[in-house]
Image (cartoon, coloured by chain):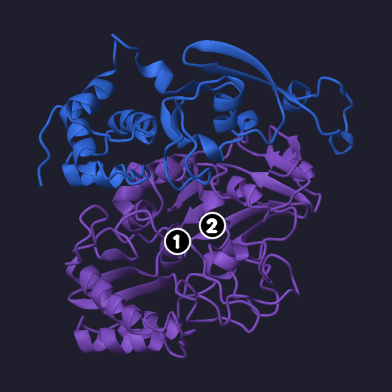
Amino acid sequence: MIRFDYARPADVAEALRDGADAQAAYLAGGTNLVDLLKENVARPTRVVDITRLPLSGIAEIEGGGLRLGALATNTRTAYDERVQADYPLLSSAILAGATAQLRNAATNGGNINQRTRCYYFYDVGTPCNKRSPGQGCAAIGGVTRIHAILGASHQCIATHPSDMAVGLAALEAQVRVAGPGGERVIPFGDYHRLPGDEPWRDTTLQPGELVTAIDLPPETFPTHYTYLKLRDRLSYAFALVSVAVALRLEAGRIAEARIALGGVAHKPWRRPEAEALLRGQEPARDLFGAAADALLSGAKGQGANDFKLPLARKAILRALEQAAAGTPQSQTDKRIA
Amino acid sequence: MSQAALSLKDDPGPALASRPIGTLPVRLTINGEDHALDLEPWVTLLDLLRERLHLTGTKKGCDHGQCGSCTVLVDGTRLNACLKLAVSLDGSEVTTIEGLGQPGNLHPLQAAFIEHDAFQCGYCTPGQICSAVGLIAEGHAHTRDEVREQMSGNLCRCGAYTNIADAILDVMGQEGRE
């Protein structure tokens, strides 16, 4: 592993001072950063250990909603009674990812800031614009089974690996951030970005900024939801395609609809026009097909991942049916009902 | 305050940016025994256990959090020791396979793994057993399917999964309801 200096601040202000250096990296659960340090992909000169910061609580927000501390672990969040009762989609998405050991260590802030698992990003022997800007992209024209079908650029076709983030996108969470300029709140849809001409920037977080919490809004989706994840083995694998759906049904019609996709783009993938098609309508397979087509409009395979286009369409249909029926996908029994 | 506690032995200077690379004082309780250590920040818990403390029961399989053979309990919670910088665990209690039981006084899971023939080569076994201790303490698994899902972070290249699940369910004191 590379050599680095180490700081362990006691509060956020101290952490921001320690993290102000562009070559500093914040360390929380370590499940991604320590791996990237070993792989020589992350090369900070200083690791700022934020594990002692008072950001591990989960608390109700006055006026509605739930604030998830950035340092609350994925395990604690997934099994929190309020999360399970009011935002079971989030609990399901978290439990669909990784393993018990990793979820016990991984934090909420770390989860949404994890890097892509693109093989070429991890292999420092191959060019990668995300790892080394301007080098080129070995994934384009390479082995692309896990890569993007939506929102890719000529510089990068990586996907975001998080399941939790897909659930948070559907719930329209907000990311609370502290930085040298004070605090700000970023709508979840604006937090992750598409690669464009700057694929090294995964998020809109600015240098030195620190995620302090993730806020879940007052609107809950306790019944009509699902997180359907399709992958190469039944547990402990990243999504090839995943679908988060949250619906609110009123008198047999869809009053509110959210659909977010994982495994297909550089960020959780949503399209307002796809969700607008569903509002005011009665659940029906034709309607779900139209929404799927709108959500996947413009999708393009890279060759080895062309299968993701029909897979995603079928997964969206099935996920909408699961959510409408109030029969969410089990994360233990992986048979798709 | 925390910085003072972490000042380098040979460099008490206040400015972090001017700190040379060196060791940091770390206190850990490992299998009930207190250890006052001086560690470089890049030492993982796994390398500390194996290379410095010679607690080689904890295995290094992939060293990337993909196989689970390094699973230990930190403050009672199962973690991958390969993905933890030891300095970040300052003040924690660590339990490894050596701390669970001894010959003649086996932990119930150790005895159950023997009873159910839950291993062949045995390389993954310390991680499997530490993981199973964590699983039982967590209390989220009740059926065979749930045990299998909650143990998915521990790979067994010999494929002893059926017997591993049997051993864990035996200790949980119930039959799997498949």
Q: Please tell me which residue lies in front, A200 or A221.
A: A200
Residue B169: give x, y in percent of width and height.
18, 33
Residue A282 found in image quarter: bottom left
Proximity of marks 1 and 2: CB atoms separated by less than 8 Å: yes
Residue A326: give x, y in percent of width and height.
19, 65
Disc sitting over residue A112 in the figure: 2
Q: What color does chain A have in the rendering?
A: purple
Q: What color does chain B have in the rendering?
A: blue
Going 17% across and 69% down the picture, which residue do you hit? A325
Q: Please tell me which residue lies in front, B90 or B41.
A: B41
The correct choice, above or below, for B118 with respect to A285 in the image is: above
Q: Please tell me which residue lies in front, A318 or A127.
A: A127
Q: With A334 as the anchor, is B9 left or right in this view?
A: right
Q: Tell me the kind of residue under disc 1.
A: Leu
Disc sitting over residue A168 in the figure: 1
Going 35% across and 12% down the picture, which residue do you hit? B102
Going 39% across and 88% down the picture, which residue do you hit? A294
The correct choice, above or below, for B108 with respect to A73 in the image is: above
Q: Quadrant of the C terminus of chain A?
A: bottom left
Q: Quadrant of the N terminus of chain A?
A: top right
Judging from the image, mark 1 belongs to the subunit labelled A
From where the camera sits, is residue A12 visible? no
Going 59% across and 67% down the picture, which residue do you hit? A120
Residue B4 found in image quarter: top right
